[in-house]
Amino acid sequence: MSEQTLTSLLDIRDVRVLERLRLKPRKSFTGRVRGERLAKEKGVSLEFKDYREYSDGDDLRHLDWNVLARLGVPIVKTYQDEEDLPVYLLVDSSKSMDYGEPGKLQMALRLAAAFGVVAARGGDSVQGVSLTDTPSRTRFLRGRRGVVTLMGWLDSIRGKGDRPVAFHLKQAGKVMGRTGLAVLLTDGMDEHLASSLGQLSAAGHEMWVVQILSPFEIDPGIEGDLRLIDAESGSAVEITANGPTLEAYRKNLAAHNETLKQSVLRYGGRYTLVSSSDSVAKVFSDVFKKAGWVE
């Protein structure tokens, strides 16, 4: 992966860390293409299983050239008992993600790009999904070509959703046809998010939730008269930030985050909280790797 390809979201130091890793889901998912992630069962078979339409980034060695010559349609062969991991990168693009410095949405995009690099290294398939009022998604992408396509798509995302992320997550779940790993990148500021997570779990997806907050949201650390504006509704409220008020804020935020975490864990998923100021390499090496998300 060249440095020039990734300069918009990842730097070369990030890539050097990421290319040594691979995703480590708890579940085993049966894939539909020949990937590098072999099934855990012994006696893996390399017997031909079926055909499917070519996807961007597929290994051309598995293209059926006879079918292409006869019909002009690119078709690849699939094999018995092999699996790739379908990875859904669910990016919260609601207005609240534009809040903070550094921006939460930018951090979500950088982490999505990083997951794409790691997935490509493991031979997995990735589909990017933007959770916004004008939803967009990529097709399933594989390999280095797929990562380049993913980067371009991520660069086009802007925070503009008026509806809460829970609504968009439910809509996305209806079209996530392949059971796989669903990585949600969000600030988690939606009290109805847990119910949407339940729907994804019921559909058989494994959920990883990365909650992203700005340093100021994690700990405001200031006192005085403040005017707070809801990024979603635009409504404003004026408060006096003193010691007791800040302490109450911290307790309420901790309780909200804990509720989200417990919801994720209850459905067998994984949860972590990161700051929008963290580096991608630090998150993957000091958080994800230590917690067993990647290896």
Image (cartoon, rainbow, N blue to C red):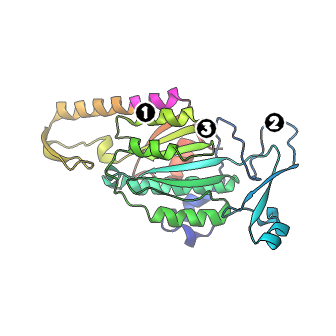
Q: Give yes or no for contact between labels 1 and 3 (Cβ–Cβ under 8 Å).
A: no
- CA gap between label 1 and label 2 equals 33 Å
Residue 176 image position (x, y, % from top left): 56, 46
The residue indicated by pointer 3 is 292
Q: Secondary structure at mark 2?
A: loop
Question: In the image, is residue 233 above or below residue 27?
Answer: below
Image height of 170 relative to 104, above or below: above
Would you say 101 lies left or right of 65 here?
left
List x then y, in percent, for residue 185: 46, 47
Q: Nearer the viewer, mark 1 or mark 3?
A: 1
Question: Which residue corresponds to the image point at 61% horizontal and 38% vertical from the top-left?
Answer: 292
> Can residue 18 be seen from the camera position used here?
no
- Residue with the mark numbered 1: 194
**Which residues make up the magenta segment?**
258-267
Tally of numbered tags: 3
Q: Is residue 114 left or right of residue 105?
A: right
Please name the residue that numbered disc 2 is placed on: 41
Nearest the viewer among 20 and 203 is 203
Tell me the CA gap for discs 2 and 3: 21 Å
